[in-house]
Image (cartoon, rainbow, N blue to C red):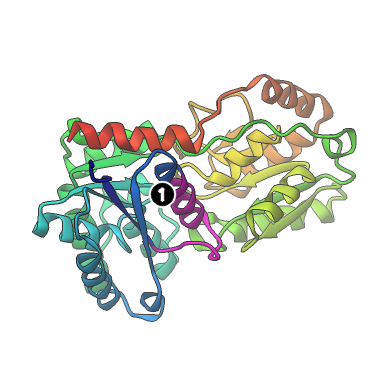
Amino acid sequence: MRMKKKILICSGLYPPDVGGPAKYAKNLEQEFLKIGYGVKVLAYGVEKKMPIGIRHFWYFFRIILALSKTNLIIGLDILSTGFPMVLAGKILGKKTILRVGGDFLWETYVESTGNLIKLEDFYNKKPQLSIKFKIIALFQKFAIKNASALAFNTKWQKEFFEKVYNLDARKNFVIDNFYPEKIVNSENEDKPKEKNFLFAGRKIKFKNLKILEKVFEELKTEGVKAKLEVIDNLSAEELKEKIKSSYALITVSISDFAPNFIIEGVGANKPFILTENCGLTKRLNGLGVFIDTSGADNIKKAVLNLLDDDVYKNYKKRLADFNFTHSWQEIAQEFLVIYKSL
């Protein structure tokens, strides 16, 4: 009898944790099980309370213990699981696919310093880094350069990382995020009672929330009937309901990658405002407003533009005609295609 091939999925989060990696790990696990693979998800436990460095090496030893007869290891982020996963795979000769959905070095630099520097400028201008960030940079570079393959969620990010890290393009692939089937809205859901702009996600500095809140405060003093709603830590179902009852979605990060929140909104036919410095501009062109988010004026103009009934209806029509989907089944199959190419 032929042995089942075994896959180890390394994720910092797993349900009941809330967040993109938890959802990704769970759905990927389910799809691999459906097609007959043996699957184990190794999620963070006590590591969540450990300082950087110590948690990585603790998790590394957990990976080593879980690798018996494993054929493939998939890591769902660059540093928290990616670095120890790639290190373990390198030592034991295991195939590794690292999913690159963000940039831990840049994100943590912005969060720690408060320097709202765009992703490209961070790498082009090379700001002075402390010892902590030099260590993070070293870990991140090791993971990216030594994984058997890299899976980016957009071509934009793939090409950017290839340039920054001088990568061999032959080992790099694009696996789009999950794009859901369209939600059919009822009459009332399609016409929100109030013009509320919804932001959902982590309240971290690169998301540029202070400027966003300032814009809506100004609009309120000017008598503009628009409301900003900022939420986080909702379950998938709670978030879905919030999106359905919103007027539009808004994310004005200084830079971003492929925010799932916006993608879910597209599935619910919701217009959006999003930074132009991200990986979704080509895929979602014409379905929302892409802007330079470096100044409050640009954000304010975009909000006022989307409040115009004719503009709003035009975006709604385009969204209704957008039918691209990308299922978890397709995502799992694309990981296997990469694995078979290694």
Query: What count of labels does the image hold?
Result: 1
The residue nearer to you, when weighing 255 against 117, is: 255
Residue 82 spot, x, y in % from top left: 28, 57
Residue 20 spot, x, y in % from top left: 50, 53
In what element is the residue under mark 1? loop
Q: What residue type is labelled 1?
A: Lys
- The residue furthest front is 1
Residue 264 spot, x, y in % from top left: 62, 41
Position of residue 35 in the picture relative to residue 53 (left or right): right
Q: What stretch is highlighted in magenta?
A: 12-30
Position of residue 129 in the picture relative to residue 275 (left or right): left
Residue topped by disc 1 = 118
The residue that appears at 53% across and 58% down in the rendered structure is 19
The residue nearer to you, when weighing 45 against 126, is: 45
The residue nearer to you, when weighing 121 against 186, is: 186
The residue that appears at 71% across and 32% down in the rendered structure is 269
User: Around disc 1, counting alpha carbons within 10 Å, would you say few (fewer than 14), some (14 to 19), or many (20 or more)?
Assistant: some
Q: Is residue 49 above or below residue 277?
A: below
Q: Is residue 184 magenta?
A: no
Q: Does the magenta stretch include residue 25?
A: yes
Please identify the quadrant where the N terminus is shown.
Answer: top left
Q: Can residue 229 be seen in this view?
A: yes
Q: Is residue 134 visible?
A: no
Position of residue 265 in the picture relative to residue 85 (left or right): right
The residue that appears at 40% across and 74% down in the rendered structure is 45
